Every structure is written in C-alpha cells, then in structure tokens.
Image (tube, rainbow, N blue to C red):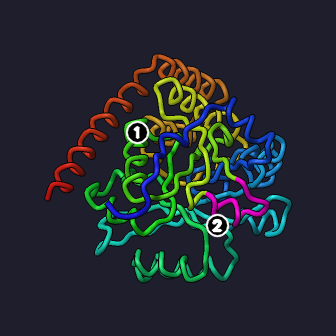
Amino acid sequence: MGGRQRNCEEKLITPERAAELMEKGWKRADLHVHTTCSFDVLPAKDLNPLSLYEKSLEIGMDFVTFTDHDTVEAYEILGWDREKLTPGAEMTLYDPEFAGHTLHINVFELDGEYFSELREIAEVEHDLNSFTGYLKRHRLPFVYNHPFWFEFHRQPNPSAVPKLAKLFPVLEYNMHELKQKNELTIALAERFGKGIVATTDTHTGKMGQVYTLAKGDSFREYFRNIEKGRNYIVTGDLTRELLIEEMNTWIDLIFEKSQKNRDIKNYLTGIKSLDALVKISRSTLLNYSPRLNRTAMNLFYMISNTGLPASFYIHSEKSFAREIEKDIEINNRK
C-alpha cells in the first residue's frame, strides 16, 4: 500500500459546513481555472484574465490562480504580483517511456524562468521523473490533474496511473469528470496517502462551484496543509443536467458572445457534439447571415435540451470508467 493512510471520503463536506469553516478563518480556492489564454477557451470578453480575476475576488476566493494550457500569458496580461494572485499553469507532458500517455499537471508559484525550464523538460525531454524532480527541488506546489482522463486520440493506459500517482503530492477531484472516475481518484489518494483537491476545471468562467478549503495565511502554507491532508473539499461531478447546462453555455459563447471575434482557435473539447458546434459556427455563411446564425443557435439549443447528446456522452464515459476499474483490479492482482 505505502504512503500515509487517510480517509479522503471524510474530507467531502457540504457548502453549509464549508461556510462554517470559512467563518473560522479557513481559506478557499478553485485551483483549476482557464482563461482566453488557453487554446480551448472561446474569445469571449468575460473569459479574459482580467474579467475572471475580478470575478474571483467578487465571489470571495481567498487565493486566485489561472491554469491555462502550457502558457503563463494570463500573468503577462494581469501582472505577476496582484492581490491574492498565485501564478500557475496546466502543463502538458507526454512521456512515452515511463507513463505511456499524456498527463496534465497543474503547477503553482511559477515565474517566467521556472515556466521556461519546465516547458523545455516537457517538450524536449518528455520525461515525467525529470519534470517532477525539478518541481520537488524548487519546492513548487503541483497537482496530478484528472488522473483517469486520457486524450481521446491516444491509446489510454489506465494501469499506469497508480505508479504515476506515487510521484505527486496531490491528486485532483475534477467537477467535469464522472463520479465513478472521481471515486477512483479518491481511492488512489487513500491508497498512497496523497492530498486531494476539488476543482471546476472551468473553461466557461464558472469558477468556485466546487473548491478546496485549508488553513494558511499564504498560498504555500495553504497548499502545504493540503499535502498533509489537513483540508476539506466541496465537490461536484459531471451529471446529465450539468452537461446540458455546460453545452448550452458553449452554444451561447460560440454563437453570441464570440461573434465579434471570429478568431476561434482550433481545438478539440473531446465531446464530439461541442466540437461540431465550433466547426459549424465558423462557417462563412453563418458569419454573414445573422438570421441563419440565430436559427442554427436555436436548433442546437433544442438538440442540447433534449438531453440526448449529454446522455450518450455520460453512458460512454460510465462504460469507460468500468473498464478502467477492471483494468486496475487485474493489474493489482499481478
């Protein structure tokens, strides 16, 4: 088993209990938030770093961080030293030898030099052990994001996840993953004595719907308490209703809020119906025909609200979660 045993289930608390703790000085943060600096966020004004920073303060986040994909551009826009702001990034690392698949790693307390050196390790060396070794030497806080997520165009390798988790101090309970996958992450954290955080991983500005509570006057002290298991999490999981709401938000962003800026970047969300929306919305005909654009938007709202796309996605993810669990059980017996 190894590591320190802890009951992570006891860390899951209600918003009401969280409110009581915050009155006693516990701090909260959503440690996985994307801005328009990420390649998979649409260019809507209310999703830019400044708008999201101001929103984070308005909703009472004690620590604010943005974890865009492989970039610290948000801090070049905001400035690196603002009230309650901790620079971070979601780093992508494909390690074909040790891991066998791509990982996403949230790293905090970054500066330009740290980021450049980490990116070189990720993009040139492709070495997870070297990457995590650098983080530990420089005492940078880091999290293994959505451990049971795999890029859909690559072969998944779930049996490798337990050995990978040993390299990380903290694992992520991700609101945009199914409960079954998050339960596997909880079990992994308990097995190896790892810390656990709850995050939104929002790409649509809905930060703070889930969060992590810990004590700490500084971000480092706050994160150190998480590493030691001295924290609580307010959680949420991907449900049919949540996915319908998320899809409708994407429809709004694609057909309305991002219409004035048609430089929508090429990206894949991993949800085929959303990817199809982006491709259709970039049509020249839709761009020059407001009536056709409105008709297309209403049609997609109607399809989304039937719940069929969401149900199909949830069903496929549940099947995949069962396959992951069986794979891990089989490998644990070996």
125, above or below 207, in the image: below
Disc nearest the viewer among 1 and 2: 2
Inspect the image, locate mark 1, and give the three-letter code of the amino acid beneath it: Lys
Say whether residue 97 is magenta.
no
47, above or below 98, in the image: above
Inspect the image, locate mark 2, and give the three-letter code of the amino acid beneath it: Phe
- Residue 7 x, y percent position in the rendering: 46, 46
Seen in the image, is 195 located left or right of residue 203? left
234, above or below 161, in the image: above
Decide: few, some or many residues near mark 2? Use Cα within 10 Å; few <14, some 14-19, many ≥20.
many
Earlier-in-chain disc, 1 versus 2: 2
Say whether marks 1 and 2 touch (CB < 8 Å): no
57, above or below 193, in the image: above
The answer, for residue 10, to whether it is visible in the render is yes
Q: Which residue matches tag 1? A: 272
Q: Nearer the viewer, residue 95 or 273?
A: 95
Say whether residue 222 is magenta.
yes
Q: Point out which mark residue 108 bears.
A: 2
Image quarter where the N terminus lies is bottom left
Q: CA distance from mark 1 to mark 2?
A: 31 Å
User: Which residue does the image show at 76% across and 46% down from the upper left?
Assistant: 45
Q: Which quadrant holds residue 101?
A: bottom left
| Residue range of the region highlighted in magenta in the rendering | 215-225
